[in-house]
């Protein structure tokens, strides 16, 4: 049965809310509030966010939101299509509605020149089957506040929600030099600050925000038992980070633990005690520090278009002509082989040149490889990638070995 995918009209948003609230019973926002939020963050209010639905015989069976992002790929800005709030009417589950929605979403952005797609998966295995590869894992820490570095914090100031534009400017400067981050618009920044429970302290250089901490308190067993939850921490330079850490340190008399979910897996070097308080030991004697989880997933929509878009990026500084054979059953127009000539790491599509080596892998693994969240050597070891000339394995490993794993702080 054919599914029509199209943008929803304003008078259809109430149906979006009805389907979404039933599909996500954990969403506690009242229907009227959710409807108002949708209207406030779509269309004329924020043209980068739009609401789409899947129709069969004129009936709306599934919904989703599109996000027109610009992502920093090692400093090169790329258009990336995001999707969120994918929901299917409860009476029409297991009828391939979600498959049709995601297929329509991918083709929407491929046709508009976005070489990459990104999403947060409600089920990682579901989206991996559709060609999405894993990004950087998140680390969930519960650190002692007293373990954070201490020192002066004379350049910190509390900020009100009216300071969102200054914070947004700081965030987007940070994006430009942080692989994987999305440029944020006013609507997404404002949404981050909507909760009345959230507070902000910022590192100021004159009138310029050069770092900020958005935080809230996590209540415990009683009114004096609290943890500090880091919602977002941005620091443009080490001095800003030191002062924000010092602010956290001096809260030790009020909060024992700091909840910090971060892509940074080097935090144990920052704090004086990285243990999470569980007391558990991993054999033989490894003290438990954090939990980890997979989340953000990436997908190549147009592999050739991707390499054209990042022609100025140096992949590992290696020189090799590489044939890349991509398996992509979900988006067949992206499947096949392309030849990429790398000169000191800079890629050029060149089908006329005889390749030095040929690698073969599925689109989900290639997506993780080019984003820098997977290593070629590991994919080979797991039998997920093959190379016809094993002598070039080390070259390909160095070619795609990323200096930084992708980071994404934007929820959508």
Image (spheres, rainbow, N blue to C red):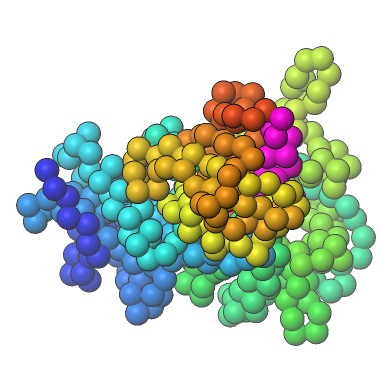
Name the residue: 39% across, 54% down: 84
Residue furthest toward the left? 57
Name the residue: 38% across, 60% down: 109
Q: Which quadrant of the view contains residue 225?
A: top right
Residue furthest toward the right? 151
Q: Main secondary structure of the magenta part?
A: helix
Name the foreground residue: 69 vs 11: 69
Q: Residue 404: within the magenta?
A: yes
Does 261 sit above or below residue 160?
above
Q: What's drawn in magenta, residue-wise?
A: 391-406
Q: Residue 29: within the magenta?
A: no
Left or right: residue 373 compared with residue 299: right
Query: Where does residue 23 sit, x and y in percent of width and height?
Result: 29, 44
Name the residue: 66% across, 52% down: 342
Query: Where does residue 385 sit, x and y in percent of width and height?
Result: 56, 30
Name the foreground residue: 262 vs 248: 262
Query: Where does residue 163 sit, x and y in percent of width and height?
Result: 62, 79
């Amino acid at each position: 049965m054919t599914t029509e995918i199209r943008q929803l009209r304003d008078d259809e948003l109430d149906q979006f809310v009805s389907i979404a609230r039933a599909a996500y019973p954990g969403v506690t926002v009242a229907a009227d509030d959710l409807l108002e939020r949708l209207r406030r963050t779509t269309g004329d209010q924020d043209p980068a966010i739009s609401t789409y639905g899947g129709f069969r015989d004129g009936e709306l069976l599934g919904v989703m939101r599109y996000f027109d992002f610009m992502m920093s790929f090692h400093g090169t800005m790329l258009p990336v299509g995001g999707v969120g709030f994918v929901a299917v009417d409860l009476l029409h589950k297991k009828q391939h509605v979600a498959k049709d929605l995601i297929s329509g979403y991918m083709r929407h952005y491929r046709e508009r020149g976005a070489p990459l797609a990104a999403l947060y998966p409600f089920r990682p295995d579901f989206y991996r089957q559709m060609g999405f590869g894993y990004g950087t894992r998140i680390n969930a820490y519960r650190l002692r506040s007293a373990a954070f570095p201490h020192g002066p914090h004379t350049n910190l100031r509390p900020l009100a929600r009216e300071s969102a534009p200054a914070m947004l400017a700081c965030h987007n400067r940070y994006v430009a030099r942080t692989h994987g981050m999305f440029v944020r618009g006013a609507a997404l920044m404002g949404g981050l600050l909507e909760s009345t429970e959230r507070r902000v302290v910022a590192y100021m250089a004159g009138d310029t925000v050069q770092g900020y901490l958005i935080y809230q308190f996590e209540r415990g067993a009683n009114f004096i038992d609290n943890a500090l939850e880091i919602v977002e921490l941005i620091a443009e330079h080490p001095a800003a980070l030191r002062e924000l850490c010092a602010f956290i340190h001096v809260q030790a008399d009020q909060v024992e633990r700091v909840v910090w979910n971060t892509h940074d897996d080097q935090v144990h070097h920052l704090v004086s005690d990285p243990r999470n308080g569980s007391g558990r030991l991993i054999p033989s004697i490894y003290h438990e520090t954090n939990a980890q989880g997979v989340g953000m997933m990436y997908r190549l929509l147009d592999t050739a278009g991707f390499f054209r878009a990042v022609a100025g990026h140096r992949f590992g500084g290696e020189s090799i002509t590489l044939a890349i054979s991509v398996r992509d059953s979900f988006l067949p127009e992206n499947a096949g082989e392309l030849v990429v000539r790398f000169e000191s790491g800079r890629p050029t599509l060149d089908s006329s040149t005889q390749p030095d080596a040929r690698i073969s892998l599925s689109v989900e693994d290639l997506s993780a490889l080019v984003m820098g969240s997977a290593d070629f050597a590991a994919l080979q070891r797991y039998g997920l990638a093959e190379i016809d000339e094993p002598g070039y394995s080390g070259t390909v490993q160095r070619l795609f070995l990323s200096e930084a794993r992708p980071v994404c702080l934007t929820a959508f």
